[in-house]
Image (cartoon, rainbow, N blue to C red):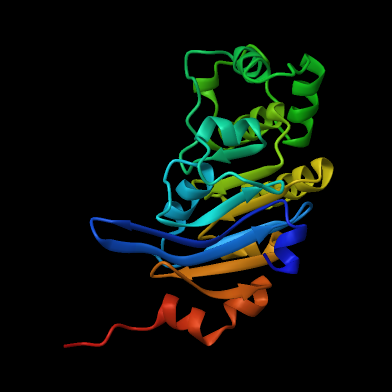
Amino acid sequence: MNRAENTSIFGCRGIDISFGGRPILKQVGLHVDNHEVLGLVGPNGAGKTSLFEVLCGRYTPSAGQVWLGGDDVTQLSVHDRARKGLARTYQSPVVPSAMSVAEVFRAARFAHRPYLTRFDAEWGCHLAHFQVRWDTPAGALDTFDRRKLLLACLLMRKPAVLLLDEPASGLINSEIDELDLVIRRLVDEYAIGAILIEHRLELLSAIADRTVVLDLGEVIATGTPREVFENPRVLAAYFEEPAHA
């Protein structure tokens, strides 16, 4: 483990995974610190979602290690990693449609011990800029409010790390600007790390401290958003025209 990994709250190293004999991830490593937002980008098929599945515990790598808070969690289940402080959102903000906002928060508060109070839920709503009536059916919320509801509910777990899978999907520009502020505020207020997959480069440029670029299952660049988006290898991966036969 190198010096940067020694001080990080969460990360992985040497991750390999294959499906049907086809390599999907090859010796992938990354890490995130407290108070840090790490962007994860790459062309379609680069392996970003597969890496998230490894990080959260749904996929077990054939090689490599995942650690959280100094502990090796490579073999832990999704639920055990959640209990240790790993929280995740998905591309589609699915909420319990038949439940009210208050009922959703009650379920989130009582999902893990120690149980949090209604005040904690109200504070989570404040930080996530979630402002709707508590008796509102969760299924009646628009896309952005669903995302904010899910973020606020994750705070009920006292997370150490947030994994955010395309949080700007389905949002308009003004909502993305607000999302910038929400994510940054959560990371700073709770002293946590966040890793987000995102195709909207303007969001990453606004809030990411560092960015990791995947292509064909390998890390091809790491650095500030500006550094990686000016990297010739990254530009080629995104924009190079395929050769004609």
Q: Is residue 34 visible?
A: yes
Identify which residue, 21 or 107, lies in the foreground.
21
In the displayed structure image, the side of residue 137 where residue 186 appears, left or right: right
Instruction: Give percent across and percent down for residue 17.
Output: 38, 57
Instruction: Give percent across and percent down for residue 221.
Output: 56, 76
Number of labelled discs? 0
Identify which residue, 178 or 122, lies in the foreground.
122
Vertical position of residue 43 compared to residue 89: above or below: below
Res. 159 image quadrant: top right
Vertical position of residue 209 compared to residue 161: above or below: below
In the displayed structure image, the side of residue 61 where residue 1 appears, left or right: right
Instruction: Give percent across and percent down for residue 205.
Output: 66, 66
The residue shown at (47%, 30%) is: 94
Vertical position of residue 35 compared to residue 215: above or below: above
The residue shown at (29%, 83%) is: 242
Res. 129 image quadrant: top right
Which residue extends farthest left? Answer: 245
Identify which residue, 90 or 199, lies in the foreground.
90
Vertical position of residue 120 compared to residue 32: above or below: above
Instruction: Give percent across and percent down for residue 110.
Output: 66, 15
Q: Quadrant of the C terminus?
A: bottom left
Q: Quadrant of the N terminus?
A: bottom right
Q: Is residue 45 visible?
A: no
